Image (spheres, rainbow, N blue to C red):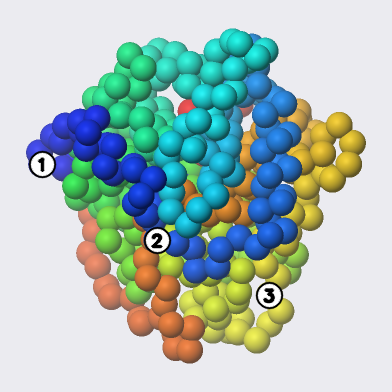
């Protein structure tokens, strides 16, 4: 399995204070189905376990790959800290800043400032905007000593060494600028595979079953104005429908997987659907209508340990290679769906099929090669910074 705008926008602290004030709604519309009390309880238990995994440098890099885990842990903690119906950036930041390694050491933000300061990859800065600075209401031009907006290439940036980095750049530009560049939108459309999904390398000639990258691509397209009837989005929804398992999960390398399940849930939610019901599946894949449907929420919760020293942790098939925090933090994101996806379409009507996709013409794009970390080819966004 292999998946700025014309004018540079300067974001002032005062402008961000308005944008991320606790009195305004989240960037995305409210999820059609708010998390039920069981999912809220599961998320609380998950976050309690995540907090026990903080490292001496303030981060959460349990697996030992810099930038692999901390940003998702930060977002999981920020989402679990929400108590109202509108996004409260102050509550999110307070919850994260309260985590001091050893009780008085560095915070996750200290770790992440060092991470982005040392990186020249625009995707690293962009992912930090999407998962950390924006939900916590931190001025991206003053993330500690780092200007994240400049680091990601500004509002006109289109260059990233990885395809997933480009997707995060687009979402960051949607948050901070007037939108992502048209060239980036075209590049994403051109990278779609014939099966409706996207692979980590962004190679349209592959046939990867990569729910993680596919979901991120859908989120980027929806943030650029695409809806359920857009041909690329419609094809991606069919991809999700055809790969949804009877258990309620989506798979990674042939095994039910919490990361692939959580990210697929976010991609479907971005289009406007309630992923806990079969509506989305039935109207994009009518041949499946009437067949049993298991909500992915229930499957994610079933993977959570409830007793023992690791109570709260979400198990993963990859645990045999070493336990890390990503399955748990991304499961929280999938169950709560409060910050991610940052842009959401209006929920399509369930009593009629989605309109037939219109035909669009696109040019070709050169795909990036997969990254290699520590001798391991990174074939999913969960392995990237």
Residue displayed at 70% across by 41% down: 46
Residue 305 placed where, x, y %?
A: 82, 44
As drawn, the label of residue 336 is none
Q: Residue 275 in the image: state x and y as whole percent.
A: 57, 67
Q: Nearer the viewer, mark 1 or mark 2?
A: 2
Residue 29: numbered disc: 2
- With 322 as the anchor, is 69 left or right in this view? left
Sequence-earlier tag: 1 or 3: 1
In the picture of the structure, the residue carrying the numbered disc 1 is: 6
Camera-side residue of 71 and 35: 35
| Residue 302 left/right relative to 96 | right
Q: Residue at x 65, y 57 (%)?
A: 250
Furthest residue in direction right, as rendered: 308
Front-most of residues 154 and 159: 154
- How many neighbours does mark 1 have within 10 angstroms: few (below 14), some (14-19), or many (20 or more)? few
Whether residue 201 appears in this view of the structure is no
Tag 3, which secondary structure? loop
Q: CA distance from mark 1 to mark 3?
A: 45 Å
Nearest to viewer (mark 3 / mark 2): 2
How far apart marks 1 and 2 lie (CA) works out to 27 Å
**For residue 293, which numbered disc appears in the image?**
3
Front residue (pair 362, 67) = 67
Query: Dot 2 surroundings within 10 Å: few (below 14), some, or many (20 or more)?
Result: some
Question: Does the rendering let one see residue 334?
Answer: yes
Rendered location of residue 172, percent (x, y)? 32, 40
First reached walking from the N terminus: tag 3 or tag 2: 2
Which residue sits at x=61%, y=64%?
A: 243
Disc 1 element: loop
Q: Nearest the camera: 192 or 382?
A: 382
Q: Is residue 275 left or right of residue 167?
A: right
Q: Earlier in the sequence, mark 1 or mark 2?
A: 1
The answer to whether 56 is drawn above or below residue 317 in the figure is above
């Amino acid at each position: 399995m292999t998946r700025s705008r014309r004018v540079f926008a300067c974001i002032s602290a005062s402008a961000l204070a308005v944008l991320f004030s606790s009195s305004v709604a989240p960037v995305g519309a409210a999820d059609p189905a708010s998390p039920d009390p069981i999912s809220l309880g599961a998320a609380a238990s998950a976050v309690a376990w995540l907090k026990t995994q903080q490292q001496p440098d303030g981060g959460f890099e349990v697996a030992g790959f810099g930038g692999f885990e901390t940003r998702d842990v930060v977002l999981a903690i920020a989402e679990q800290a929400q108590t109202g119906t509108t996004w409260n950036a102050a509550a999110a930041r307070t919850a994260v800043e309260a985590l001091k390694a050893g009780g008085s050491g560095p915070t996750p933000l200290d770790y992440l400032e060092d991470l982005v300061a040392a990186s020249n990859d625009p995707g690293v800065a962009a992912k930090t905007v999407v998962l950390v600075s924006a939900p916590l209401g931190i001025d991206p031009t003053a993330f500690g000593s780092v200007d994240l907006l400049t680091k990601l290439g500004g509002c006109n940036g289109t260059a990233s060494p990885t395809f997933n980095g480009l997707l995060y750049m687009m979402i960051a530009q949607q948050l901070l600028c007037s939108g992502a560049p048209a060239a980036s939108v075209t590049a994403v459309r051109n990278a779609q595979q014939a099966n409706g999904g996207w692979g980590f390398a962004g190679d349209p000639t592959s046939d990867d079953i990569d729910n993680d990258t596919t979901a991120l691509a859908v989120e980027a397209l929806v943030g650029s104005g695409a809806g359920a009837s857009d041909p690329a989005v419609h094809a991606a929804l069919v991809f999700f429908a055809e790969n949804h398992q009877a258990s309620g999960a989506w798979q990674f390398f042939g095994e039910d997987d919490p990361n692939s399940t959580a990210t697929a849930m976010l991609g479907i939610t971005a289009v406007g659907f309630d992923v806990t019901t079969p509506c989305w599946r039935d109207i994009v894949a009518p041949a499946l209508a009437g067949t049993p449907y298991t909500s992915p929420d229930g499957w994610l919760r079933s993977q959570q340990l409830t007793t023992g020293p690791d109570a709260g942790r979400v198990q993963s098939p990859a645990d045999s290679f070493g336990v890390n925090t990503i399955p748990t933090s991304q499961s929280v994101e999938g169950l709560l769906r409060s910050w991610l996806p940052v842009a959401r379409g209006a929920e399509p009507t369930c009593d009629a099929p989605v309109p037939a996709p219109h035909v669009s013409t696109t040019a070709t794009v050169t795909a990036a090669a997969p990254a290699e970390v520590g001798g391991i080819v990174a074939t999913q966004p969960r392995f990237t910074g």
